[in-house]
């Protein structure tokens, strides 16, 4: 297979003549380039390149952990947690051996893990620097050798180890007899390779999107996917328990047995049942999928490393004029409108801020609605939406990062600080007030409890005001930096304690501040005056507005007097 290099650089070399004419590349040792070699890189095969790429990945990991002790501690903790979970699931699957539903469960689990591998590069593009093969575009590497080396490097990490434990346990759970055990020796690595190749093929096909700003914005959906996924898993487990066990998954498993890589595990189960013809077809499906994924990966790799980047072509064209936004015309004049517009633009355009908002909006909606659909919900769970959205008031200055110095220059008095915090609270209320009301109304509709709607709205508005109050104070007293260089880091190393104090302390304080409205609601129910519970709506709304105003007033002088400390705190990381 040949591919011509783009002008100005050397691309993938496809013929021996091209390799011979290329300039000798430096040999790569365990720590990187160590000198000039006599063998061109293009003449190295997969076996020679694989150790180099594995060493490169280990070096990238080691150097990344050296940047901070916080990153090292987080990585070690994640490794320990992943190993514990992997060991637990391996033991659980082994104990499942002989159970009538083992075949159904392992097929479904394998399919879910494969789906996770497919989605991983889309939602976490910054998780592995070797996912970007465009860094190797100047090296004369053959496609076949390159994808083999990248595949070997992909097998190093927590994810592959976790998947290996699950696949191994799945094979042990369904393998009965010598033929099934022998087939498992082939199926376990095959399943792992299909998962990794699937992830690599998806990443290579979308790498230019993932490395662009729009691609980084795509990562904000990870919080939504995780939130929705957890709730659906919880919902599914409850449905399975009501249905009487794993037999409810049999129709789904019957389909997944013919989809790779679950078909490979299904082949082991088929051999155990004596269905050798069916097992051969299922194994062939996974083998064909691996071949197709490798071919697709190679095609994407060649195109990536030989075709010009479309984004640079677009950048060379005439500059696009931004159309005037109508948002400014709807906001108040002066500092309040300017700050509100800036805060709302952060929500719309800053990846980290957008991720936090999407997660809060999703969880705030899913928790009360899922519980209502399950028949064991309460309309008061709608207050969960107000609590989740109120968290966005915390660490207001952290989202500015080091650019907070421009905001600090505009604050010369307590009045300026008050207007800044009030405008930020207004910007949040533009979203949180209608959304909290919508979630409460939807919850009441699903439960059919319209009578309790006014008091639930009153409690939600009171809690939202209390969260605004404690969030304003926490922003002034406990600011912390939000790093922008990684999708994984939400707090700069060394500031985790500030983040926990700010959020947990503020949430507890917000709940305590709502005590008068909660007491009024309980008192009306205990005294039998349930016909007057509608009074909680105006009372809670007025109380929420009052407590939010008081919190901003308390936080304003602290903000004005602590501008240097706030700037230092939000500029770290």
Image (spheres, rainbow, N blue to C red):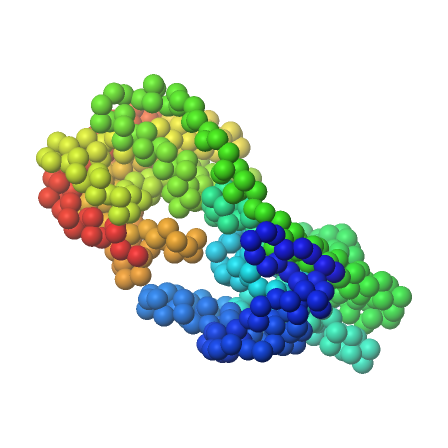
| Number of marks present in the image shown | 0
Q: Position of residue 115 (x, y in %)?
A: 63, 55
Q: Nearer the viewer, residue 314 or 111?
A: 314
Q: Quadrant of residue 61?
A: bottom left
Q: Nearer the viewer, residue 208 or 547?
A: 208
Q: Quadrant of residue 132?
A: bottom right
Residue at the far bottom: name it.
Answer: 178
Toward the front, the furthest residue is: 21
Q: Is residue 148 visible?
A: no
Query: Eyeballing the image, is 26 above or below 348?
Result: below
Image x and y of residue 471, in percent: 26, 42
Q: Residue at x 33, y 26 (%)?
A: 537
For the point 26% across and 47% down, which residue is it? 402
Q: Position of residue 257 (x, y in %)?
A: 77, 58
Residue 96 falls left or right of residue 573 = right
- The residue at the point 72 percent across, 65 percent down is 15
Q: Quadrant of the N terminus?
A: bottom right
């Amino acid at each position: 297979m040949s591919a011509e290099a783009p002008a100005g650089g050397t691309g993938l070399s496809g013929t021996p003549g091209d390799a011979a004419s290329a300039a000798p590349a430096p040999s790569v040792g365990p720590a990187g380039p160590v000198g000039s070699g006599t063998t061109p890189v293009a003449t190295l095969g997969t076996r020679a390149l694989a150790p180099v790429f594995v060493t490169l990945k280990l070096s990238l990991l080691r150097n990344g952990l050296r940047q901070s002790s916080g990153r090292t501690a987080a990585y070690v903790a994640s490794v320990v947690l992943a190993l514990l979970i992997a060991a637990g699931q391996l033991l659980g699957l082994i104990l499942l051996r002989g159970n009538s539903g083992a075949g159904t469960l392992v097929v479904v689990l394998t399919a879910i893990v494969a789906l996770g591998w497919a989605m991983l590069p889309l939602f976490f593009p910054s998780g592995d620097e070797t996912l970007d093969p465009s860094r190797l575009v100047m090296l004369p590497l053959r496609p076949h050798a390159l994808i083999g080396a990248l595949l070997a490097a992909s097998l190093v990490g927590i994810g592959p180890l976790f998947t290996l434990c699950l696949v191994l346990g799945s094979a042990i759970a369904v393998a009965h007899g010598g033929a099934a055990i022998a087939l498992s020796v082939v199926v376990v690595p095959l399943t792992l390779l299909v998962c990794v190749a699937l992830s690599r093929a998806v990443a290579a096909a979308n790498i230019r999107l993932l490395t662009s700003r729009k691609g980084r914005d795509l990562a904000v959906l990870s919080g939504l996917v995780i939130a929705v996924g957890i709730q659906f898993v919880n919902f599914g487990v409850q449905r399975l328990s009501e249905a009487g066990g794993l037999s409810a998954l049999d129709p789904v498993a019957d389909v997944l047995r013919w989809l790779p890589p679950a078909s490979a595990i299904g082949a082991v189960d088929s051999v155990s049942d004596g269905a050798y013809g069916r097992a051969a077809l299922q194994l062939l499906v996974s083998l064909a999928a691996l071949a197709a994924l490798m071919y697709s990966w190679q095609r994407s790799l060649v195109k990536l490393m030989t075709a010009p980047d479309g984004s640079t072509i677009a950048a060379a064209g005439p500059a696009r004029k931004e159309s005037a936004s109508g948002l400014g015309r709807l906001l108040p004049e002066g500092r309040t409108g300017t700050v509100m517009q800036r805060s709302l633009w952060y929500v719309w355009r800053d990846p980290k801020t957008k991720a936090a908002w999407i997660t809060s909006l999703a969880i705030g909606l899913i928790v009360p609605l899922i519980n209502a659909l399950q028949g064991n919900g309460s309309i008061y769970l709608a207050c969960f939406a107000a609590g989740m959205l109120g968290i966005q008031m915390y660490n207001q200055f952290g989202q500015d990062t080091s650019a907070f110095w421009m905001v600090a220059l505009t604050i010369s008095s307590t009045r300026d600080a008050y207007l800044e915090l009030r405008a930020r609270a207004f910007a949040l209320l533009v979203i949180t007030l209608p959304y909290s009301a919508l979630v409460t109304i939807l919850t009441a509709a699903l439960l059919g409890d319209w009578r309790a709607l006014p008091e639930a709205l009153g409690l939600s508005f009171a809690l939202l005001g209390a969260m605004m109050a404690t969030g304003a104070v926490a922003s002034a007293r406990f600011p912390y930096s939000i790093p922008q260089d990684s999708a994984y880091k939400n707090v700069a190393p060394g500031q985790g304690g500030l983040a926990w104090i700010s959020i947990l302390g503020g949430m507890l304080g917000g709940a305590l501040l709502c005590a008068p409205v909660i007491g009024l609601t309980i008192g009306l129910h205990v005294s039998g005056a349930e016909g007057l519970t509608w009074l909680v709506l105006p009372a809670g709304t007025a109380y929420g507005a009052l407590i939010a105003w008081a919190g901003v007033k308390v936080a304003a002088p602290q903000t004005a007097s602590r501008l240097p400390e706030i700037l230092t705190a939000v500029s770290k990381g």
